[in-house]
Image (cartoon, rainbow, N blue to C red):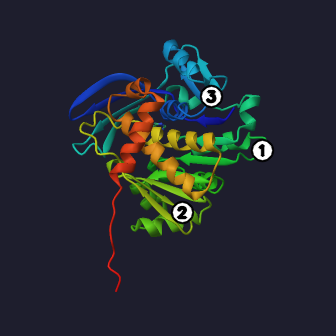
Amino acid sequence: MQLVTVGTVAFDRIETPFGKADKVVGGAATYISLAASFFLEKIGLVSVVGDDFPVEVMAMMRQRGIDQAGLEVLKGKESFFWAGRYHYDMNTRDTLETRLNVLLELDPKLPAPYKAAKYLMLGNLDPKVQAKVLDQMTERPALVAMDTMNFWMDNALDDLRKVIARVDILTINDAEARQLSGQHSLVKAANTILAMGPKYLVVKKGEHGALLFSEDRVFFAPALPLEDIIDPTGAGDTFAGGFIGYLAHTQDHSFDNLKRAIIVGSALASFCCEKFGIQRLLEIKREDIDHRIQQFVDLVDFDIELVEE
Ligand code: AMP
C-alpha cells in the first residue's frame, strides 16, 4: 500500500447561492483518495459506511486503486451525512446538519498491508481516531500529513495537540491557524504551530490560495481564478489528496518538491469546485491535470528588472 488515508465517506447535501445538490457522495476520505489516485496505484481507505452507500461508487473507487479492506460496511445502518450552505463569497459556509450515524462506531482496524504504508494522510476526524490509526503503523511512515478543523479545537484540544505533535505536515485553513495558535498574523501563527511538532504547515485560504511554511521558508500558491465556482465542498480534502499523492509518487520530501505538491493539490482542488460533489474529479484525466498545472505556472510567471543603485 503506497498511501493509507482515514476519514469520512459520506453523503452530503449542499446549497450554494447558485444551486443545490440533495444527496451526493462526499466525505473527506473520498475526496482525498480520489485525488491521490491520479498519482498512485494502491491506496488504502480506512473508514466506515452504512449499507445505504452505493455499491457502484465503491466499485468505481476500487477500479481507481482505492482498496477497501479497511472500509467497514455496517448492515442496517446509515452513512455519515453532512449538510452545508455556502455564503455568497463561496469561501465561507454554515453547517446545517451533521448526522454522525455510523461514524459513532468507527474503531479503525488496519489490515496488515496498510500498517507498513510509507505515506499516511489523517483526514479530518476525531483526533482519538486519528491517533488510533497512527498507533497501528508497524513502522513510522516516511511522511504523515493531517487535516483537522475548528470543531476539534473547540471540543478536543488536548487530544488534538497530541496528534499534531506526531505528524510531519498539518493542513488547516487560515481561521483555524489563527484559532489554534492564538495569533492573528499567519507568520506568527505558523511559528507557534510548527513549535507544536509538525515540520510543515499548509494554510489553506480557499479562493485566495495556500501558504506552505517550514521553520525558515514560506511559499505561496494562488488558487486558479475560475469563471464559475459551482461547489467548493471537498476542495480542501482534494487539495490534501493531490498533495500527498504527488509526494508519495515522487518520494521526495524536499521543500522544493513540497512546493510542486502544493501546486498539484491546488490544480486538483480547482477541478473539484467546477461541479457538485466528486463529479468533476471523475471526469478528468491526468492530461487535464498537467494542462491545469501549466495554467498555474503561467498565472504567476512574470519578469521584472530591478534598478540597481
Ligand atoms: P472540505 O470542503 O474539504 O472541508 O470537506 C468537505 C467534506 O467533509 C464533506 O464531503 C463532508 O462529508 C465532510 N465533513 C463535513 N463535516 C465533517 C466532520 N465534522 N467530520 C468529518 N468530515 C466532515
Query: Mark 3: which amino acid?
Result: Glu
Answer with the quarter of the image where residue 85 lies. Answer: top left
Query: Mark 2: which amino acid?
Result: Ile
User: Residue 80: x and y, percent?
Assistant: 48, 27
In the picture, the disc for residue 260 is none
Ligand 1 is within 8 Å of the C-beta of the residue at disc 3: no
Ligand 1 placement by image quarter:
top left
Q: Quadrant of the C terminus?
A: bottom left
User: Residue 87: x and y, percent?
Assistant: 25, 42
User: Residue 248: x and y, percent?
Assistant: 62, 41
The secondary element bearing badge 1 is classed as loop
Q: How many marks?
A: 3
Q: Callout 1: few (<14), some (14-19), or many (20+) C-alpha neighbours within 10 Å?
A: few
Location of mark 1 (residue): 139
Q: Is residue 156 visible?
A: yes
Which residue is painted at 49% across and 23% down in the image? 79
Instruction: Give the Cα distance between marks 2 and 3.
Output: 33 Å
The secondary element bearing badge 2 is classed as helix
Query: Mark 1: which amino acid?
Result: Glu
Answer with the quarter of the image where residue 134 lies. Answer: top right
Which residue is painted at 31% across and 42% down in the image? 93
Location of mark 3 (residue): 41
Q: Is residue 99 visible?
A: no
In the picture, the disc for residue 193 is 2
Instruction: Give the Cα distance between marks 2 and 1.
Output: 25 Å
Q: Quadrant of the N terminus?
A: top right
Direction from residue 136 to residue 201 in the image, left or right: left
Nearer-N-terminus badge (3/1):
3
Which residue is painted at 38% across and 27% down in the image? 280
